[in-house]
Amino acid sequence: MRARHAGAIIALLAAAAGCGPKAPAQPTARTEAPRPEAPAAAAPQADPLGPRPELPKPKPFAPPAPVVIDGPNGTKVWLLERHTLPIVSVSVTVASGSADDPKGQAGLAHITASMLDEGAGQRSAVELSSAINDLGATLSVGARADGSVASLAVLKKNFAKAFSILADVVARPRFEAKEWQRVSALWQNDLRKRGDDPTRVSSLVSTAALFGPGTPYGHPVEGLLADAKTIGLPAVKAFYKAAWRPDRAVISVVGDITRDEVMQAISRDLGAWSAKGAPAAPASAAKGASPGAQPGKGATDGAPAAAPSWKPPRLVLVDRPGAPQSVIAFVREGVAAGDARRPLLQLVNTALGGSFTSRLNQNLREDHGWSYGAASAFTETRRQGAFVARASVVAEATGPALKEMLGELARMADSGLTRDELAKVQAQDRADLVSAYETANRTALRYATLARLGLPETFDAAASQSRQQATLAGLAELARAVDPKSATIVVVGPQQEILPQLKAIGLGEPEAWDVEGQPIQAKKAP
């Protein structure tokens, strides 16, 4: 076999050696064949459905305004008849919330509202809950910074019975000692557990760092654990007496009901609800606001909510050893809900962090994959509120994510929106407003929000018109309200892993705070 292969190879080599170089052949003359003519372009076929229609520019949505009626004992009634479905929604709003909590009693408005449906009128807590369930209704009570709300949603055929229960909750709560012991214990347990939730801790610490611990807006609505341990049932009864009064109440009613039916129910079930003693003094009035100032026009709503001597820190860190994620936040002063700039600032915020396609979310979530979501908002408050941008990110990307957020905020503050962003956020504004008034329940809750903020019932229509007429130049000027240069940065996460990252992006040494929104004083060396 080897001999055969060798012989074959030798033969091939000999043949190759005999093939010497040859003189190059002379090229023969080529005659170019005629090129075929390009076929003429076929004429586009006409669309059998005709030309595509031009969509007109969407008109601003004008939300329905309620009829305002003077009710008994100083109440105001906002009524919107909507007879498309046999549903009625009611909200009773009083202008006292956590901003009115007395010093050292943070959470008093919250726990007072929580006690209202724990027995009222002739019903115990269990009987009241069962009665609501039997009627197929929903009833809830809660507090916000600037007000408290009791809400009811029920079928029209059960309205009279359900409204009587709501009236008992608002005007005739029982405040039984046995229920207080249970509710207070659950409240304190929730406050203890809050420290395990980094998002709740971030929210709490952010407002405390901006406004100052213990100020009207500087403590959480649900209160502080140290204060909760000292609040007793007598304090709850006293706060209820001063805050839940008919002369401070707005009753919003939306749905399949007439004016006569509403006023008969209010007269029957709330006719004996009377105001006794002096009302709770609004927190804003205690800060030297002008008496009688109108919402959005006077000093009351625009007055600074922070303590006069408080200087917000630049960088705050709440340590969560071993946590796989960090919650990062930028917080700075915002505007009051009645400020003429706020409707336009909502457009700026929608582009920045108020929608899924916003700049912050696209950067941190879609481009880098550090977060499940990033968002921002201007808070809705009677007085000057806050602007907050926040995201939960993987701990190892805390520094880079902060740097990216700083960049997005700075770019928005420097340049404002693009033309495409303006068109998108104006379309989003219309959609959001339609959604807010889509159902009877949402409409009643929106009226409750307007009443809580001291805004007129026609506010949303005027605000939407302002947003739809916004210009790029005007928004670019307002976008400075998100400038991060004066913002406080709050980080909740593992200190050991985060500190080197903070220094790497030039943020320096942070202040250490605890989960209850209090600065941790550094121990002095002996």
Image (tube, grey):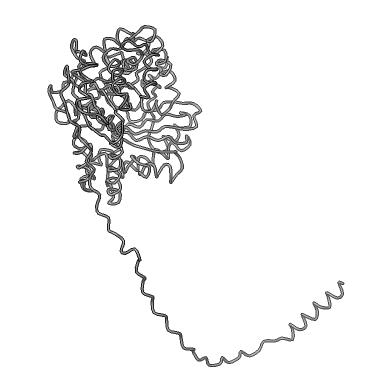
For residue 297, which quarter of the picture?
A: top left
Residue 229, relative to residue 490: is it above or below? Answer: above
Farthest residue toward the front? 157
Q: Residue at x 42, y 80 (%)?
A: 39
Residue 33, relative to residue 468: is it above or below? Answer: below
Can you give x and y, in whole percent of width and height, for residue 455 in the image?
19, 30
Q: Residue at x 31, y 13 (%)?
A: 105
Name the side, left or right, on which 288 lies relative to 514: left
Q: Residue at x 41, y 26 (%)?
A: 318
Can you give x and y, in whole percent of width and height, for residue 47 in the image?
35, 66
Name the side, left or right, on which 201 lies relative to 457: right
Q: How many marks?
A: 0
Depth check: 477 or 89 in front? Answer: 89
Depth check: 469 or 335 in front? Answer: 469
Q: In the picture, which quadrant includes the C terminus? A: top left
Q: Residue at x 34, y 14 (%)?
A: 115
For residue 198, which quarter of the picture?
A: top left
Q: In the picture, which quadrant includes the N terminus? A: bottom right
Can you give x and y, in whole percent of width and height, for residue 288 in the image?
16, 21
Depth check: 174 or 295 in front? Answer: 174
Can you give x and y, in whole percent of width and height, for residue 210 in the image?
30, 27
Name the side, left or right, on which 214 lies relative to 72: right
